[in-house]
């Protein structure tokens, strides 16, 4: 206890001592900082001779801002545009109030009004953008002049301590007036623009309010339409609707079709140009690679229909990804028609069941017909009859196709599809008969559009996969190296990234809009991207998660492509051997994977500093539990940097010969001469003795021991051995064979033949050939190869076995 108290006392005194010293040091530091600040202030104060030029320069700056402040934005033009927006909103208010009173207003009319509001909001944003930029510029200038005011005030306060000349005082007063005038001018203009901006944003609030009201009214109309029943088709009232007036309305519908005009083409010219460029590019690529596509069973259709493939790809690319819902309805029908016709041309030679071809043709035809009915606003009673007949024919055709499929394919894999489709059409049929026309029309149009989107999506993604595979096939012949299986797997991985992104951001939003989950594709995409979950204090959205996974997966695919590129024959001209290229490729791959992992973590919103702390804590655990794995990992890096062994090298370890096949992060795979795979931890290759027969060269020295009988001609033996060595073509001619007379053995004269084999991998065979040739030459020259002999001396022999002479 006494010892503990003494230790505590010493620690307490030491803490007090450190606290006092730290306090003194801190006070000294603060004193030095104050002296530094004061010194800096003194140094920044201009000389009296510089005051008047600085004041003149300040005056010039004021004149510049005075002349430019009125030119930042055209206030009169913005006021005029804002008035247009106000007038539009007044007219819209009247139109909207009238629509609310009408019971027969349709969803399309409400959607059209909402699209108009969205366009008006975009116009407002375009008007407001230069105003916002001008306000930001004025705010920046205001802060600059406030800084000037503080600077001149500090200069004046410092120089007043001394006897300052009167003219300098006048310059200071003039500078202060200039600064005040500048601030007054900026504040006045800033107030004007802010008031104008406030008036404008009132219009934006009105637009947002109307947008919200229309959305609610649209939802209410949908709910009411589903709940409210129309006239049943079996009642007389339904047939009384078919009058000459209704028939005449069809003709009026054709007359009211709005065709694209110059304004439409001015707005969507980029979409049309993009579609044409994509179409002609696809046609060119298909015709250029027709032979490759024709030999591939999955892409033979593309090779036979190059123009149809290009048109279809161009239409789907623009229509599914870029074209918005505010475009002209007649133009959309035109795109759907040429896209559907090109799709039908693609599958004219469909190698499958006949019912599949008929099904595809029927779907494309219904897409065009339904689009035309919607364009001319076909009367609802006629459209109901059309759906009734179509549902009846559809149920019959499904039953027929099911029988044909069983007879030809003899499988039941499509039976579930046929059964679900039949039940669905039966529901549509009975809904239409009993008067649930909205439900029936919604189910019919949603099903038709869904089938079209899914089929077009499959073909579209298939064409993208063909393009990626074609690109890798071209690259593999020029700059990429790898087995066909590796290249095929890389194509699949790369296609997977593209397919997932296209499905999530292009096709899935359209399906959600088709089934009424969202009103527009931008809203669907925005909702998908922003939805997510919380992980601690970090909100992980679907968009961030997809981006993070894409970055991580993309870094993996990119590292594989770079590895194949570095291992190709492109680098042979740079005199880089295979081992060097492999080491560079793997180091780059590990770097890309690590960088992709960090980028994926950062994309999700995690702080990399906190992540570093987690890695540090993990390092402690690694030090205890994963030490062997870390040692092997570090050893793998050493093998890649120092390259004592490389892939393809032949090594000898613990008396076993083997060839290195792959150096991994943790272990190295080798193949012995017995054709067995052996996994060796990397640290064994670093810490243990390894003989690399092919590191710097492939030569190997052979020592062949030969013993001849006593009495043999030594000179003849040595000459024969040299002659045998020189006659072997697998030995280096630049290295003369050496024959050494080593010693006198028990029953032999021992010689040693030393030669240098060209290839260590062939050294065993070379040694065998030399021994066989030596035996042959010795026999021809009567040189006896000795074998162990023993002389037996009998000191005593039994008389009974003695041999009588």
Image (spheres, rainbow, N blue to C red):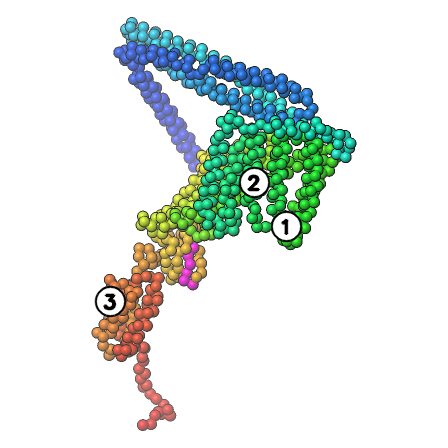
- Distance Cα–Cα, label 1 vs label 2: 29 Å
Of label 1 and label 2, which has the lower sequence position?
A: 2
Name the secondary structure under disc 3. strand
Q: Quadrant of residue 257?
A: top right
- Distance Cα–Cα, label 2 vs label 3: 85 Å
Q: Which residue is mark 1?
A: 413
Magenta span: 668-674
- Distance Cα–Cα, label 3 vs label 1: 78 Å
Q: Nearer the viewer, mark 3 or mark 1?
A: 1
Give the numbered dot on residue 145. Answer: none
Residue 546 seen by the camera? no
Of label 2 and label 3, which has the lower sequence position?
A: 2
Residue 430 rendering spot, x and y as whole percentages: 73, 38
Image-based side of 332 in relation to 692, left or right:
right
Examine the rendered structure and indicate whether residue 317 appears above or below residue 711.
above
Examine the rendered structure and indicate whether residue 22 appears above or below residue 398.
above
Q: Nearer the viewer, mark 1 or mark 2?
A: 2
Residues under numbered marks 1 and 2 in contact, where contact means CB atoms less than 8 Å apart: no
Q: Which residue is mark 3?
A: 738
Q: Which residue is mark 2?
A: 341
Examine the rendered structure and indicate whether residue 334 appears above or below residue 701.
above
């Amino acid at each position: 206890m006494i010892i503990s108290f003494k230790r505590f006392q010493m620690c307490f005194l030491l803490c007090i001592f450190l606290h006092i010293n730290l306090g003194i040091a801190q006070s000294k530091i603060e004193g030095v900082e104050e002296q530094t600040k004061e010194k800096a202030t003194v140094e920044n104060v201009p000389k009296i001779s510089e005051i008047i030029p600085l004041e003149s320069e300040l005056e010039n700056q004021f004149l510049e801002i005075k002349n430019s402040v009125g030119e930042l934005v055209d206030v009169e033009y913005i006021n005029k545009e804002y008035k247009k927006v106000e007038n539009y909103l007044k007219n819209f208010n009247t139109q909207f109030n009238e629509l609310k009173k009408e019971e027969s207003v349709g969803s399309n009319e409400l959607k059209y009004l909402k699209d108009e509001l969205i366009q008006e909001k975009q116009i407002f944003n375009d008007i407001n953008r230069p105003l916002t930029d001008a306000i930001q510029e004025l705010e920046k200038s205001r802060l600059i002049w406030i800084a000037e005011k503080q600077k001149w005030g500090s200069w004046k306060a410092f120089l007043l301590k001394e006897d300052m000349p009167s003219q300098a005082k006048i310059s200071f007063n003039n500078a202060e007036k200039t600064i005040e005038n500048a601030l007054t001018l900026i504040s006045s203009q800033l107030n004007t623009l802010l008031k104008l901006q406030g008036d404008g944003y009132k219009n934006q609030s009105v637009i947002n309010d109307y947008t919200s009201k229309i959305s609610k009214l649209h939802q209410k109309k949908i709910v009411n339409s589903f709940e409210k029943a129309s006239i049943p088709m079996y009642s007389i009232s339904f047939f009384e609707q078919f009058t000459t007036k209704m028939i005449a309305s069809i003709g009026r519908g054709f007359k009211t079709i709005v065709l694209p005009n110059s304004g439409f083409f001015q707005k969507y010219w980029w979409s049309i140009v993009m579609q044409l460029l994509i179409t002609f590019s696809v046609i060119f690529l298909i015709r250029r690679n027709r032979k490759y596509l024709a030999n591939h069973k999955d892409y033979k259709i593309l090779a036979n229909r190059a123009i149809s493939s290009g048109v279809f790809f161009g239409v789907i690319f623009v229509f599914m990804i870029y074209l918005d819902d505010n475009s002209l309805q007649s133009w959309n029908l035109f795109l759907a028609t040429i896209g559907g016709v090109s799709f039908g041309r693609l599958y004219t030679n469909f190698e499958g069941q006949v019912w599949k071809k008929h099904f595809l043709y029927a779907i494309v035809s219904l897409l065009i017909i339904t689009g035309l009915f919607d364009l001319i606003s076909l009367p609802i009673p006629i459209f109901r009859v059309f759906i009734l007949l179509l549902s009846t024919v559809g149920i019959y055709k499904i039953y027929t196709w099911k029988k044909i499929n069983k007879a030809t394919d003899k499988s039941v894999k499509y039976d579930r599809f046929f059964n679900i489709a039949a039940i669905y059409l039966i529901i549509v049929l009975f809904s239409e008969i009993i008067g649930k026309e909205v439900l029936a029309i919604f189910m019919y149009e949603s099903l038709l559009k869904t089938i079209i989107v899914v089929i077009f999506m499959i073909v579209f993604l298939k064409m993208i996969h063909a393009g990626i595979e074609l690109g890798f096939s071209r690259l593999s012949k020029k700059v990429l190296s790898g087995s066909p299986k590796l290249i095929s797997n890389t194509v699949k991985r790369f296609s997977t990234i593209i397919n997932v992104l296209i499905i999530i951001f292009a096709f899935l939003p359209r399906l959600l809009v088709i089934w009424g989950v969202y009103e527009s594709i931008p809203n669907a995409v925005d909702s998908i991207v922003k939805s997510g979950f919380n992980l601690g204090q970090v909100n992980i959205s679907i968009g961030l998660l997809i981006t993070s996974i894409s970055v991580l997966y993309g870094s993996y695919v990119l590292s594989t492509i770079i590895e194949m590129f570095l291992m190709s024959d492109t680098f042979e001209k740079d005199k880089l051997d295979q081992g060097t290229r492999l080491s560079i490729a793997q180091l780059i791959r590990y770097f890309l994977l690590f960088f992709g992992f960090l980028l994926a973590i950062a994309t999700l919103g995690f702080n990399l500093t906190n992540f570093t702390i987690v890695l540090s804590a993990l390092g402690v655990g690694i030090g205890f539990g994963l030490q062997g794995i870390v040692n092997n990992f570090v050893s793998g890096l050493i093998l890649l940097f120092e390259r004592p062994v490389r892939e393809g090298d032949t090594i000898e370890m613990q008396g076993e010969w083997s060839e290195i096949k792959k150096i991994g992060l943790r272990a190295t795979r080798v193949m012995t001469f017995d054709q067995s795979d052996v996994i060796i931890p990397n640290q064994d290759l670093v810490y243990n003795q390894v003989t690399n027969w092919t590191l710097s060269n492939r030569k190997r020295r052979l020592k062949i021991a030969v013993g001849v009988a006593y009495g043999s001609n030594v000179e003849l033996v040595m000459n024969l051995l040299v002659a045998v060595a020189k006659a072997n073509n697998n030995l280096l001619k630049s290295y003369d064979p050496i024959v050494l007379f080593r010693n006198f053995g028990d029953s032999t004269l021992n010689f040693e033949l030393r030669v240098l084999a060209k290839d260590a991998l062939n050294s065993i065979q070379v040694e065998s050939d030399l021994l066989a040739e030596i035996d042959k030459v010795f026999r021809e020259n009567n040189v006896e190869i000795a074998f162990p002999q023993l002389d037996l001396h009998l000191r005593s022999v039994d008389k009974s076995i003695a041999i009588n002479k």
